Each structure stands twice: as C-alpha cells, then as structure tokens.
Amino acid sequence: MKAKLLSLLLLGSVIFTMNSCSSDSSEGAVTANAIAKSKEVSTYIYSAEELKAMELINEYRVSVGLNALKTINHISFKSEEHDFYMISNNVVNHDDFVARSQNIIEVLDASKVGENIAYNYNTPEGALKAWLNSESHKKNIEGNFTHFGLAIKKDSVTGKKYYTNIFAKI
C-alpha cells in the first residue's frame, strides 16, 4: 500500500512539475508578434485615384531628395477603415489614430506612424496640394518613413471624398 501511495505521489509530482515549468527558449513558441502578424491584411484593391495619389506623393518625395515609399496593403486597409468611419459618422478627424498606429506597430513592426486626412478634394492633386500647404501634413509627407498606405472613399450620400494617408517607418 505504501509503495502504491509513493508511486502515485511520484507520478503526481512529475505531472505537476511538467505543467508548471517554463522555458527560456522561444523556439516553437507562439509570440505576441506572431499572433499580431497573423492579423495582417494582405489584400487591398486600389482605385485609379488611390494609385495616382500614392504616385504623386512619391514623386514629390523623390523631387526633394527623399526615398520613395513602399506600399503596404494592410496600411491602406486601415486607411480605408478610417475613411468609412468618417463617412458613417459625418466627421473629419483623427479619431482612434492611436489604435490605428498601435495596430500598425504591432502587426508590421513599425517604429513610427503618421497620418494625414483630407476631405472634399475632387482630385488627388488637390488633396496633395492642400497637404503640402499645411506645415503638419507636409511634415508627414517629408517624414522619415519607409512605407505607406492610402484610401480615398466617396460618401454615397453627399458625393464628397474622404482621404486617409498613413505613413510608417518599418
């Protein structure tokens, strides 16, 4: 009886030890970053206007001696979400920018994020001109960024266009 009880206690302590130990190795472990990466949106369908706006921004950056920015679909998706938020709430603002930037930091390993918005410009040229005439918006366009995304969405009720342009350093 004592031998059985001792065997049971030994077995129980082995099981307890196996379940309570932690490892310093990250090999094979699922990290928070890996979980965030799995939430990356990889597909985004660009309109001709969105492509033109990104082309204009890169042309401007190159003309002033800066690097052209690479497009990331996930950032354009986050831009589109904000456009739809502004349209559905009839506002033009940076609401939830912290959440958008935190998502981009976590999902894409960005170290820095900036955002420009615009409203009621008929063309990408008009929006870019307005951004360049604004010190804070121009600072983002000329910022130390490596990637960007952009969305332009039209309010089906008013016909007015909403622009969200997000920049990231990755």
Image (cartoon, grey):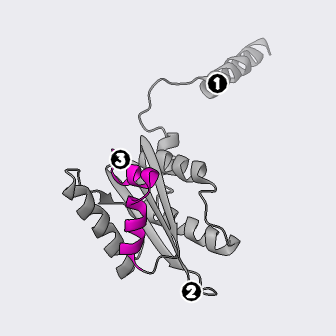
Label 1's element? Answer: helix
Q: Residue at x 47, y 45 (%)?
A: 105
According to the picture, the residue beneath numbered tag 3 turns out to be 143
Q: Position of residue 133 (x, y in %)?
A: 40, 60
Mark 2 is on which residue type?
A: Gly
Q: Is residue 132 magenta?
A: yes
Label 2's element? Answer: loop
Mark 3 is on which residue type?
A: Gly
**Which of labels 1 and 2 is toward the front?**
2
Q: Is residue 26 magenta?
A: no
Disc 2 crowd rating (10 Å Cα; few below 14, some 14-19, many 20+) is few
Q: Indicate which disc, 1 or 2, sits on the residue closer to the N terminus.
A: 1
The one nearer the camera, 54 or 99, is 54
Q: Indicate which disc, 1 or 3, sits on the residue closer to the N terminus.
A: 1
**Is residue 145 depicted above or below 60 in this figure?**
above
Instruction: Tell me where the magenta segment starts and ends, as one range.
Output: 123-144
Mark 1 is on which residue type?
A: Ser
Q: Indicate which disc, 2 or 3, sits on the residue closer to the N terminus.
A: 3
Q: Position of residue 143 (x, y in %)?
A: 35, 47
Label 3's element? Answer: loop
According to the picture, the residue beneath numbered tag 2 turns out to be 159
The one nearer the camera, 43 or 82, is 82
The quadrant in which the C terminus is found is top left
Occupied quadrant, residue 15: top right
Disc 1 crowd rating (10 Å Cα; few below 14, some 14-19, many 20+) is few
Q: Position of residue 95 (x, y in %)?
A: 63, 56
Q: Give the left or right position of residue 81, taking residue 63 as reference.
A: right
Q: Residue at x 66, y 68 (%)?
A: 91
